[in-house]
Amino acid sequence: MSRLIVISNRVSAPTADKPGAQGGLAVALSAALREADGVWFGWSGETGETGEPNFQTFDGVTSATIDLPEQDVEEYYDGYANRTLWPLFHYRLGLTEFEREFQGGSERVNRLFGDVIAPHIQSDDLIWVHDYHLIPLGWMLRQQGLTNRLGFFLHIPWPPTRLLTALPEHRRLVDALFAYDVVGFQTREWLETFHDYVVREMGGSIGEDDLVTVGGRTIRVIACPIGIDADEFIANATSEQAQAAYTRMVESSIGRSLIIGVDRLDYSKGLEERFNGYQRYLETRPDAHANVYLLQIAPPSRATVESYQIIRAQLDSLSGRINGAFADVDWVPLRYVNQSYPRAALAGIYRAARIGLVTPLRDGMNLVAKEFVAAQDPEDPGVLILSRFAGAAEQLDSALLINPYSPDDIADAIDKALAMSREERVARWRPMFENVRDESVIWWRRCFTDSLMRV
Ligand code: F6P
């Protein structure tokens, strides 16, 4: 059987010294790899001279990491990935920085990844590259002479053609995708915007069976939404740690309804707009005060990038203003927490919540929405309020779908969710739960690798 080689910017597979909390994507990739024999290559997250990969096997997953020199981290990761592609692909042209050395750094690091990884590849390995940092890697691996089946999956949105063409080297970036055999997107929407670029900008054509042709090169391009390790998360929700977190929340809520938000601290997550929506709810429903509170968990990320420092400072002051304006001696309307929690504890917190508030301005998928659904008590589930601009909205369409830019939309949805009958909550939750269970991370891994195997 072929090995599965996963390559992503950062490897956050659990290791013996760091077995703890991980983000949604890391958990998903660990689960996919545990099921298939394979190796996960990527950056260790540390700065230093790049040497041979450091191989470690823990909990059924082998990881192989390299360090990157400081200049590479600044230009490739902080620069091109987080100051150019991330804002552009999340429709934030105003935050996008166009610096030639960022692009140079990105190409240099992609080439370095290719040079370091290629000697460890066997001829029948399936290679699966992940995310916007590594778009050019397929091309670099082909230059090393690799003829393996090569796939790429984009975890974030694909931007509309007119936005993408703001990037001076847009054509070079998209050309690089044609070094892969299969390219995957999270949703039909991103797939269609990619088709649009291919037709308009490249003069390409869209054929049967997911095939896309430009010049003499045909690749398969699919929509294949990532899921969560549903069985693990459902088990998590009733674990001892989850029970303890559940009890802690119920006791500290003293009969008030908990609204929960859990997000990496990122401007794409719509946290400022969410706080404004909650503030609108408090302003317009004075009778509801003291019956409800919002717990927002937001661990900081990418703290060296200025736009992240700005959003953090804005949220600090907005949360202070909301509490200053509405709190009472025995009630704090907003608990804003900047630390991360183990997944089992989160499962318990989700289960204790009456509402899951997931309102990104733009999101490739959003696995928090799926985890919230998986953690609910089937007899008495909470309500998911979900941004219509999250990839997850294509699958979780019986959530209360809202426009995250509209404070009134958010406030009305909170009102509706708090008043919703148990019958309606169950009726909305059940199809979402079935989707989360059936289209799990294992389903996603198969959906993509089966497509790659057909090449
Ligand atoms: O989902 C997009 C993504 O960039 C993932 O690739 C990554 O695991 C996650 O967000 C967190 O980003 P970072 O590694 O920059 O903290």
Image (tube, rainbow, N blue to C red):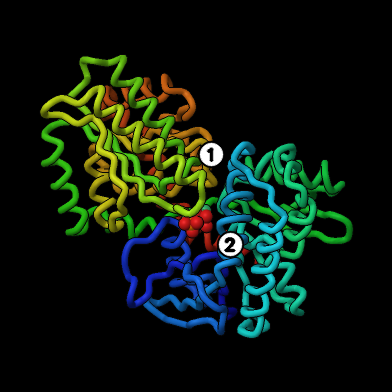
Q: How crowded is mark 1: few (under 14 residues within 10 Å), some or many (20 or more)?
A: many
User: What quarter of the picture does the N terminus occupy?
Assistant: bottom right
Give the residue type at disc 1: Arg
**Image mark for residue 130:** 2
Three-letter amino acid code of the residue under disc 2: His
- Rendering quarter of residue 344: bottom left
Looking at the rendered structure, the secondary structure element under dot 1 is loop
Of residue 309 and residue 371, the one placed in the foreground of this image is: 309
**Picture coordinates of residue 306, whole percent (x, y):** 51, 47
In the image, is residue 142 above or below residue 221? below
Q: In which quarter of the image is the C terminus?
A: bottom right
Q: Is mark 2 within 8 Å of ligand 1?
A: yes
Horizontal relation, residue 201 to residue 290: left or right: right
Q: Is mark 2 on a helix, strand or loop?
A: strand
- Is mark 2 in CB contact (under 8 Å) with mark 1? no
Q: Quadrant of residue 56?
A: bottom left
**Label placed on residue 188:** none
Residue at 56 percent of width and 72 percent of height: 69
Q: Is the CB of mark 1 within 8 Å of ligand 1?
A: no
Q: Residues within 10 Å of mark 2 (few under 14, many from 20)?
A: many
User: Residue at image x 43%, y 72%?
Assistant: 34
Q: For the point 37% across and 75% down, which residue is it?
A: 15
Q: Name the residue under label 1.
A: 362
